[in-house]
Image: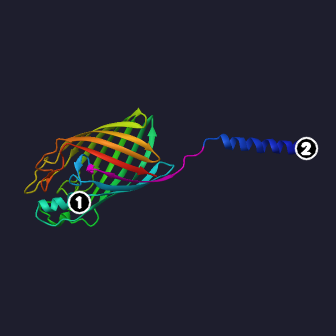
Amino acid sequence: MKLKSKLLLALLATSSAAFAQTAPAAPESTLSYNVGVVSEYRYRSIGQTKGTPALQGGVDYANANGFYLGAWGSTIKWIKEAGVANSYDAKGPVEIDLYGGYKGEAAGVAYDVGYLRYQYQGNTLGNKPSVYTNANTDEIYGALTLGVVTAKYSYSLSDLFGNLNSKGSTYLDLSATFDVGNGYSLVPHVGRQAIKGVVTGVRTDKQGDYTDVSFTLNKDLGDGLSASVSAISTNANKSFYTTNNYYQGKNITVLGLKYSF
């Protein structure tokens, strides 16, 4: 009896070990970082650095339960240039994006809902309140992905990027990601920015609305390094989006290099 008991315990132990080795591993939480440079920082296809390069970087935390948090930053010039164009000193050389949300899937459709804060630390854009308010902006967003196609809708809870009376502005983004092999991917995109209530002595309602289109080719170079080239076009109103003699919505090709780790 004692021998049989020992054999039974040994078999159970072996079976338990085998089960532990073959059972699927639980998803793990991740922490990742990225740094990069672009030949011009374009956001929603509008120039942020007056045709000059920008340094960028970020950190992302993704919990196994679907919740995530992140921060991302970039050098910018548009706040200073907007001040110069309107004859005052406006400061704000850095954009810091703070965001959090939840990702999941239902009926084969992936979804993503969250909050995003654009923090232009110490910016003085609102020092001329007849033209601009503070640049800091709060948005909520929701996105759905089916196959290679993603649709995303963003809604501003505050004035948008310093534009007066623009709370409730929206951006609708439709994009797709195609794997074309050998580490290449192609991302076509079309977006529609609608800015509410911009009415001042020099800006009128609907003047800030525009549609943008882009095609981005990405290349995975291995070891966390990737490169990109983007062809970008907009129909943004030239008088509204020209600051200090630079048209922020002009057609452009943007080159990028990023390292993720």
Residue at the spot of label 2: 3
- Spatial CA distance of label 2 from label 1 is 78 Å
Q: Position of residue 118 (x, y in %)?
A: 30, 57
In the shown orientation, is residue 242 left or right of residue 35?
Answer: left
Question: Is residue 34 in the magenta section?
Answer: yes
Residue at the spot of label 1: 135
The amino acid sitting under disc 1 is Ala
Mark 2 neighbour density, 10 Å: few (under 14) some (14–19) many (20 or more): few
Q: Position of residue 52 (x, y in %)?
A: 24, 54
Question: Is residue 36 in the magenta section?
Answer: yes
Of the pair 239 and 219, the residue shown nearer to us: 219
Of the pair 8 and 53, the residue shown nearer to us: 53
**Can residue 170 be spotted in the picture?**
yes
Write the start and end of the magenta stretch as one range: 25-42
Q: Earlier in the sequence, mark 2 or mark 1?
A: 2
In the shown orientation, is residue 93 left or right of residue 238?
Answer: right
Total residue callouts: 2
The colour mode here is rainbow
Q: Secondary structure at mark 1?
A: loop
Q: Secondary structure at mark 2?
A: helix
In the shown orientation, is residue 16 left or right of residue 40?
Answer: right
Which residue extends farthest left? 201
Q: Quadrant of the N terminus?
A: top right
